[in-house]
Amino acid sequence: MARKTTYRKTYSRKPAGRSFLSRLFRGLLLIFFGLLFIAVIYHYRKGLAYYLGFKTEKVLDEDEVDKHLSDVRNIRVLENHKGKVIGIDVSEFQGKVDWEEVEILDEKYPVQFVFIRATAGNDRVDRQFKKNWEGAKENKIMRGAYHYYRPNENSIEQADLFIKTVKLQKGDLPPVLDIEKLPKNQSLDSLKKGLKRWLVKVEKHYQVRPIIYSGERYYSDFLKEEFGDYLFWIANYNFYREKIEDDWLFWQFTEKASLPGIKHRVDVNIYNGDLEQLHFITVE
């Protein structure tokens, strides 16, 4: 007769200490993220209050709330730079601008300067340049013109196009070279030589040193060391950045602002100084 074999069930039990530590860790993690959320809300309370209507007594529908939440950081940045000069930059991508309406940003911050795209590459004149150039002047907004540089096109031809298109007057801001892209068919050394040729020719014509515009990473990686004699206008839209660097002349801190007179979103810039200092760098 076969002997009946019996099996005893065994149950694995987690050590009580390990279970407690796991629950404690999850609890602390939830508390941490809760406090972080509260801190972020408090940090941006002025922007949230403004755009959700608590400050202006506006009643916003869901679409308007969604549209303006992206600008909450903008309010924080502007609050951090009281006393500095606020301006915008425009091109044909903003459509037709009603310059008589372009006065106040977020009902509080006057727009006191504008950079206007004049040319791109060696053959492209911005379709709205003439109207924008004249409109800014007529409405007493300090103006400047910029050229969008195409790395794979002749630099002298690009400079000639800009010079032919832009007639600077006393009180205008210095010309700007906008460089954002790396070359496809040339080396970095060749690109830098082209940039220098553009800068030298434009400076010789207008008798004022141009400003260089670029993104912060591009500036740090490719331009800062070799073009240290020039003043820079830097673009950085990162949510965590809230103050301008000491060595930046201008900071383009957002590309998603709303402004009366402009149907589409617009870039907003801060000049690293007051209005008197801004006048000091204009064309004489």
Image: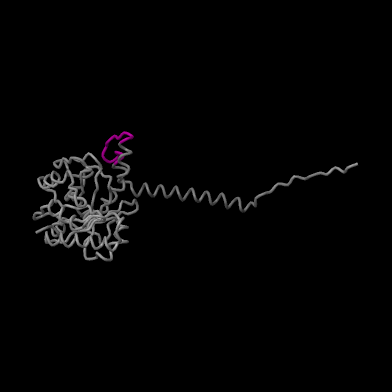
Tell me if residue 1 comes above or below residue 190 in the rendering. above
Colour approach in the figure: one colour
Nearest the viewer among 17 and 219 is 219
Provide the major secondary structure of the magenta segment.
loop
Image x and y of residue 233, in percent: 23, 56
Residue shown at 15%/42% (left/top)? Answer: 99
Q: Quadrant of residue 182?
A: bottom left
Residue 246: in sight, yes or no?
no
* Residue situated furthest front in the rendering: 185
- The answer to which of 143 and 177 lies nearer the viewer is 177
Find the magenta span and give its range: 51-63
Name the residue at 29% across, 49% down. Answer: 76
Q: Is residue 39 magenta?
A: no
Count of numbered marks: 0
Q: Is residue 268 something one can see in this rendering?
A: yes
Q: Is residue 4 left or right of residue 258?
A: right
Percent across and percent down for residue 185 are 30, 56
In the rendered structure, the answer to whether residue 47 lies left or right of residue 107 reads right
Direction from residue 221 to residue 145 in the image, left or right: left
**Residue 55 coordinates in the image, percent (x, y):** 28, 41
